[in-house]
Image (spheres, grey):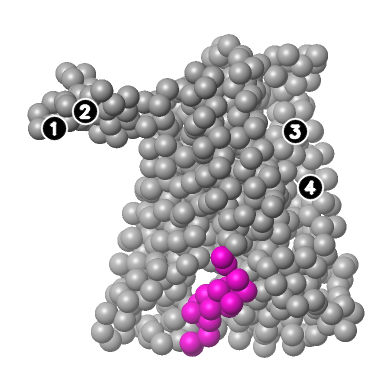
Amino acid sequence: MSHTNDDETPGDVEAELDMAGSSGPDLEFHGGAAASAIPLGVFVLWAVVQSGLFGIGDTTGLVIGMLVALVVGLFFAKGDWSAYANAIFEGMTQRVAATAIVAWLWAGMFAQLLQDGGFVTGLVWVAQSLPVSQATLLAILPAVTFILAALLATGIGTGYGTAVTFVTTFFPATVLLGANPVLMFGAILSGAAFGDNLAPVSDTTIVSAVTQDADIGGVVASRFKYAVTAAALAFVAYLIAGATMTTGAGNGALPDGNPVGLVHLVSMGVVIYTAVRGRHIVEAITWGILTAIVANLVLGLESLNGMLSFVAPANAPFAEAFTWLPVLSMAGPDTAAGVGGSLYVGASGFFPLIVLTLLIVAGARIMIRGGAFDAIQDFLLSTAATSVRRAETTLVLGTALVNAAITINTAAEIAISPYVARVGESFNINGYRRANILDANTSALGYIFPWAGGVLAGYSQMPALVEQYGPEMIVSPVNVVPFVFHGWFLFAVFLVAALTGFGLEYVPDRESEEVSRV
């Protein structure tokens, strides 16, 4: 999920963790504890059919799928259905979902301001001005985009926000130049995954450290070698893919480049600088939004009415008296009443994903309260985790399995963290190592599965791009799966590390500093 929160302390995370799993199973199902996994299981099946078999990447369709899944689960619940219903509400009110929603809304407004303020045409101008051939430029664009997205995500600590920002800015610019859309989307998701995994201000970093009794600074330092190894492999893979894969069909729609839009590099710099200084991500993006608004107005990149507009219906009793306001106009024969502008479009684009997130976290809560997680943990602990290497391999595969079901990465991390701690402590595995295994999968796989939150955050911005630039701006979440190179390499690095013992540390090898946010 990856947002930073100065008000979020280890105590907050531990409270969320206690809420997630320490109270024990208290929902009973026909079919036993395993039946509590039915809602998430039905949702994953729905997502595979909708996105994989039918090729429909509609977030609202996934919302319906999760609603149907929760209804199906209801018929397996024993006794009074009110307990099942209360578990849904309990899950939807968890902080882990609410904080993600706030970060997405702010990131959406910021990204739309940059897009409508000409940042895309500024990037096109840069590409047109580079002293390299078109073929060379297209070959290196995926690798360069991966690095830039990784730097932004590491700086601001929000992988989802990075996906939104790059899909609405870098993605259309590069596709219009002729880059392969699927490869570019994969590079953006890879960069987001890198930052989600490594940023000290990322939610996944904070949760992985605190739940494994490790200090955040030590965790970041200890995982650097894994993240950089996977990133180096991904960079090479994007260079090869960029040079060999067929480019897109967007060359004919290339707009005129305009360097003025590059002023929004300052807006992005303000966000990165403020976030790195340790400020809350909402505060950091707010300063970025204000900077972008001022730049748009001063340089004439976008009018105030373009950033926020109200169109009142013709029969509104008092609206006409206020039409002197630059943001208000009256609806005409060809104009519908409503609210519009960059701020509105940027925030509203996330509404389906917000609802989906709340419902997925509710499904995870049912699975926890029904005992399915405890049953999985007990089975793996007693049968699979019989040696240190088998235990670590089980941790890698077990966290991957959970992330396939709970597609909001921080929620998945909180759900599986007690099992990681339990298995790791049983074999005396150091907290740094446990935190790294836990975070690698939640960061990597959260940007790979077609129904994962990171993928949908980026995809949710594409329909608006289609209206503005053309049909080549849409990429099916299923098609991008093989090209999230960093995500796959990060998963592979930790699987190899578990199988070989590379980087393994035991508790006596290194003592964690006091657990703290920084």
Residue ID at (68%, 63%): 205
Q: Is residue 319 above or below residue 287?
A: above
Is residue 233 in view?
yes
State if disc 4 and disc 1 touch (CB < 8 Å).
no
Nearer the N terminus, badge 1 or badge 4? 4
Q: What element carries label 1?
A: loop
Q: Which amino acid does label 4 sit on?
A: Ala
Q: What residue type is labelled 3?
A: Val
Q: Mark 1 points at which residue?
A: 318
Q: What element carries label 4?
A: helix
Q: Name the residue under label 4.
A: 231
Is residue 172 in view?
no
The disc placed on residue 144 is 3
The disc placed on residue 180 is none
Q: How far apart are marks 3 and 1 (CA)?
A: 53 Å
Instruction: Count residues near mark 4 (Cα–Cα under 10 Å), then give few for <14, some for 14-19, many for 20+.
Output: many
Q: Name the residue under label 2.
A: 322
Find the magenta span and give its range: 7-24
Residue ID at (70%, 14%): 128
State if disc 4 and disc 3 touch (CB < 8 Å).
no
